């Protein structure tokens, strides 16, 4: 093992461990609220409203929305973890120490992203545990399910990093989640199938990247999908590549970090 690789590995492990310990230490604020909130979604939409709706795509409405609810928790928490952590590092001005160190930018980025992915997966496990009170879990394709949830957590961790780079105040880290992320999530097919929509709105829905993630995850759980699974993977991987490249460019140029 080369000295450079060993040094980078130690740096990555240090950043990732710090990020993971950060959200685990305050799990009452980072994991438990998500589990409670998603439990309420299942009770209200799945338990109370669901029986009046009936079946959706051939499945009980509760079963239909659970994959989307799990994915919603992954999206919001992976994003929130990275944006708050990186902005906090900027605010406390210790991110500058990372940037002037010999650590490559991609190692710094992967360390923060790993923390976001870990929180997203932790919340997914917690929400899945809550959903077991309403749902007899039978996963259609375990591999697709795991790959989609990891890729989604990675994508929104990268998006959160970009938000953290450009944020100048604490208010800035909530603007994108409130006015962009939340509407796209609710319109991403969590509570309905796009087959219910008029043809124009079906086409418009295809412009929403979150739809592909929710749909691919639902395919992994239930085996039903409005969109070809391979198309969904191409879209997700394309966004990851674009966001990853953008993050490295921002770090290289010191945008939003250097005075």
Image (spheres, grey):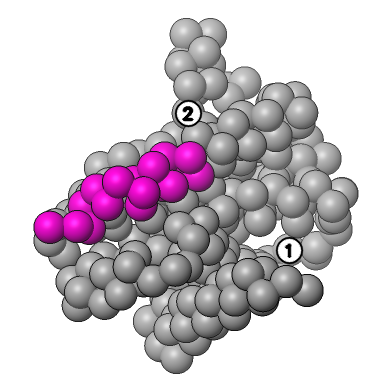
Give the alpha-carbon distance from disc 1 to disc 2, as whole Å: 28 Å
Mark 2 is surrounded, within 10 Å at the Cα level, by few (under 14), some (14 to 19) or many (20 or more) other residues, namely some
Q: Is residue 69 above or below residue 2?
A: above
What residue range appears in magenta? 243-259
- Which quadrant is home to the N terminus? bottom right
Quadrant occupied by the C terminus: bottom left
Q: Nearer the viewer, residue 71 or 106?
A: 106
Which image quadrant for residue 98?
bottom left
x, y percent for residue 57 = 72, 33
Circle 1 Cα neighbour tier, 10 Å, few/some/many (<14 / 14–19 / ≥20): some
* Quadrant assignment, res 246: top left
Q: Is residue 128 magenta?
A: no
Residue position marked by numbered label 1 in the rendering: 135
- Horizontal and vertical percent position of residue 196: 57, 22
Residue where numbered disc 2 is placed: 208
Identified at 30% across, 75% down, the residue is 97
Q: The residue tagged with tag 2: helix, strand or loop?
A: loop
């Amino acid at each position: 093992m080369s000295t450079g690789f060993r040094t980078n590995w130690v740096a990555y492990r240090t950043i990732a461990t710090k990020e993971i310990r950060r959200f685990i230490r305050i799990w009452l604020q980072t994991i438990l609220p998500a589990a409670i909130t998603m439990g309420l979604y299942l009770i209200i939409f799945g338990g109370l409203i669901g029986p009046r709706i009936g079946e959706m795509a051939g499945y009980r409405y509760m079963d239909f929305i659970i994959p989307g609810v799990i994915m919603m928790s992954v999206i919001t928490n992976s994003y929130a973890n990275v944006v708050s952590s990186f902005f906090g590092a900027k605010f406390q001005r210790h991110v500058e120490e990372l940037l002037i160190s010999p650590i490559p930018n991609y190692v710094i980025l992967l360390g923060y992203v790993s923390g976001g992915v870990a929180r997203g997966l932790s919340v997914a496990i917690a929400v899945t545990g809550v959903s077991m009170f309403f749902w007899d879990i039978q996963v259609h394709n375990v591999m697709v399910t795991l790959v989609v949830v990891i890729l989604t957590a990675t994508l929104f961790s990268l998006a959160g990093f970009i938000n953290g780079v450009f944020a100048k105040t604490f208010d800035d880290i909530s603007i994108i989640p409130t006015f962009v992320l939340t509407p796209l999530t609710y319109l991403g097919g969590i509570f309905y199938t796009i087959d219910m929509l008029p043809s124009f709105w079906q086409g418009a829905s295809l412009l929403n990247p979150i739809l592909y993630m929710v749909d691919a995850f639902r395919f992994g759980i239930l085996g039903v999908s409005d969109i070809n699974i391979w198309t969904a993977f191409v879209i997700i991987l394309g966004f990851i590549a674009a966001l990853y490249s953008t993050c490295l460019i921002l770090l290289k140029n010191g945008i939003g970090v250097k005075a």
